[in-house]
Amino acid sequence: MTRIDDVARLAGVSTATVSRALRGLPTVSQSTRERVLEAASQLGYIASPSASRLAGGKTRAVAVVVPRITPWFFSTVVEAAEERLHRAGYDLLLFNLGGSEHARQRLLYTSTLHKRVDALMLVATPLAENDFAAVTGLALPGVTVSAGTPVPGWPSVRIDDIATARTATDHLLSLGHRRIAHISGDSTDELAISTHLDRRHGFQQRMRSRGIEPDPALDVEATFTIAGGSKATAELLRRGDPPTAIFAASDEMAMGAIATLRSAGLRVPDDVSVIGVDDHDVAGVVGLTTVAQPAAAQGRIAAETLLGPLRGNVDEYGDRSVVLPTQLVVRDSTAPPRES
Amino acid sequence: MTRIDDVARLAGVSTATVSRALRGLPTVSQSTRERVLEAASQLGYIASPSASRLAGGKTRAVAVVVPRITPWFFSTVVEAAEERLHRAGYDLLLFNLGGSEHARQRLLYTSTLHKRVDALMLVATPLAENDFAAVTGLALPGVTVSAGTPVPGWPSVRIDDIATARTATDHLLSLGHRRIAHISGDSTDELAISTHLDRRHGFQQRMRSRGIEPDPALDVEATFTIAGGSKATAELLRRGDPPTAIFAASDEMAMGAIATLRSAGLRVPDDVSVIGVDDHDVAGVVGLTTVAQPAAAQGRIAAETLLGPLRGNVDEYGDRSVVLPTQLVVRDSTAPPRES
DNA sequence: CTGAAAGCGCTTACAG
DNA sequence: CTGAAAGCGCTTACAG
């Protein structure tokens, strides 16, 4: 393996100059730089990242932490972040919590992240009061995506979950629905991220502003998955007197709801309307009405936000916190209630 | 930041002993180990990964290369690989090619991977003849997942795509279909992975074994996405005289097909049956009949395959190459043809 | 603009 | 079982 002194020897300069020339530092004369570049390419020289990291103190890597990888939102955020990060020359270390508190603890309280990355992107990752010290202790620039828990000093990239829920609720109300069920995340989870709390809040707020007190019997909690939506809907049906519409906190939940409604012999939207949040890849296929959120943009912007501090402007975050707009997309899963 | 000599001093031993004790090497006495562990925890010492990598020559990281992140198959493979790799103490560097030849070239022919990881997992990543040298030049243990291009000396983890296609075709034939269309990947792509070629091959093989010559007019190529399946189906309908059944090379393509058929006023399965491959998360919601493949198992097994060589048994790959079984899952998108 | 030298913080033979 | 010393391969002040 050729090392930096091989290049230095061939180019007739010091290793310091090779290092500077190859990294494009400005303090190298044009002719010297060319000679170094020539020598390096002739020898097929590539600097050892481990050595650079140790000597330079920078890893040129970013950790991206997600609660799951497969769901539409997370895979889309990761894909966009990967593109932006690699383009800027950073490696992406992927950490999946898998919904496991143990994994979360390990990430925060062991050596997992220590000196391994230059920055952190927490996607929908909840933090408890006493977790902040651990995160702050890393002394790394960071960004949160999709609410999660805001970290003091870090920018966040997200949508307005309350407004999003209001949009969904408005759509259902304007069609004439009054008995509207809501499928949301698990509120008893201490570490619950704000996402589903905000969505429920927006829903209830809008219902009340129209003079309708949300019926607790029509409020069910579930995980943010197809299976969660299915289970929640089954529970809803078990309670009798089904709603005329369901607002699910995510498209995956909404799809689970549709599947369960259909297998119970109910037609969508004829018997029950369903609306979700996301605009999942598959939403169009299912004909799902939803409030679309820009997932890729969130991943890309979060990555860009990190680029400033990563390049040494420790306190210069890109555009700081950003709230991206969401938009109603009407398809075939919503219609006026049967007898309105 | 506490360093190894701080720990050495507190424990009253040399840095070499600290290093050995902390890494659990056997050549350390019980009492010394305890003293070191105590000192380390008291000081909150964590070894610098960069220094360890430089001195030890191992990165304890694995690169996982995927053509895309969001599709069901890839995100599922990555999720499973991540779990297994982190559990074994390895970092996962994620590289997404994004279908870009440029990204592929950059990965293979620049410093991207050089001394950055100890092993490589190529998921459905095509290699041309002259790419092998680049991959071999890395001198890393590796594994391929889902066909892609087999790399000499590397094990592979995959399904039998030919058999899978036969299973799908058999299902359609046994329902009485004869005019069966096939939506597959783009065969003109030089770098085409074998997946869709094999699936087409299995399809045609089984058709012919039943005395049916596959109609070229019923063979359309597309990308492995919902949009691809939609477009291919639109093309199929444009050609007139639609098939009574469609075998799509993936569930995402099949979902695109269903969406397009429906918006063309055709009913599934009444007018046209549709079968896919994967058993995508959403397949159940859509009622899609499919041939299920174990994606998570492929990711997990691929990761495990790497663990042997990673731990120093350079030539000892886990179970070497593995072919996992697939299974027909009948749902509501297939039925006998209208007038059979 | 360039170089000599120190330093980044570990691990690994080697010797005992 | 343990330590002294060299070495991993760069980058960074510092000096000129």
Image (cartoon, coloured by chain):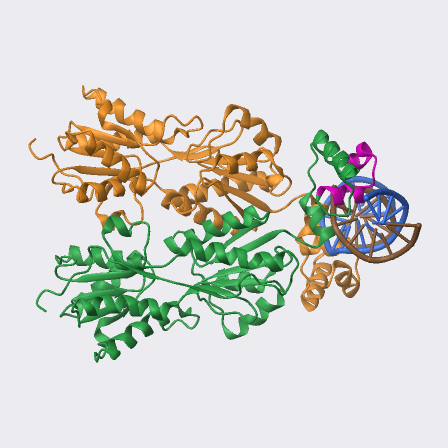
Chain colours: A green, B orange, C blue, D brown
Direction from residue B177 to residue A123 in the image, left or right: right
Place of residue A217 in the rendered image (x, y in percent of width and height, measured from the top left): 21, 74
Q: Quadrant of residue A174?
A: bottom left
Residue in view at x 35 percent, y 38 percent: B224
Place of residue A107 in the rendered image (x, y in percent of width and height, measured from the top left): 54, 61
- The answer to whether residue A279 is magenta is no
Place of residue B2 in the rendered image (x, y in percent of width and height, measured from the top left): 73, 63
Direction from residue A301 to residue D9 in the image, left or right: right
- In front here: A266 or B20? A266
Residue in view at x 55 percent, y 37 percent: B107
- Toward the left, the furthest residue is B339
Residue in view at x 20 percent, y 70 percent: A173
Relative height, residue B300 to residue A218 (above, below): above
In terms of secondary structure, what is the magenta stretch mainly? helix
- In front here: C11 or B73? B73
Q: Quadrant of residue A114?
A: bottom right
Range drawn in magenta: A6-22
Does residue A112 appear anywhere in the picture? no
Q: Quadrant of the C terminus of chain A?
A: bottom left
Does residue B161 appear anywhere in the picture? yes
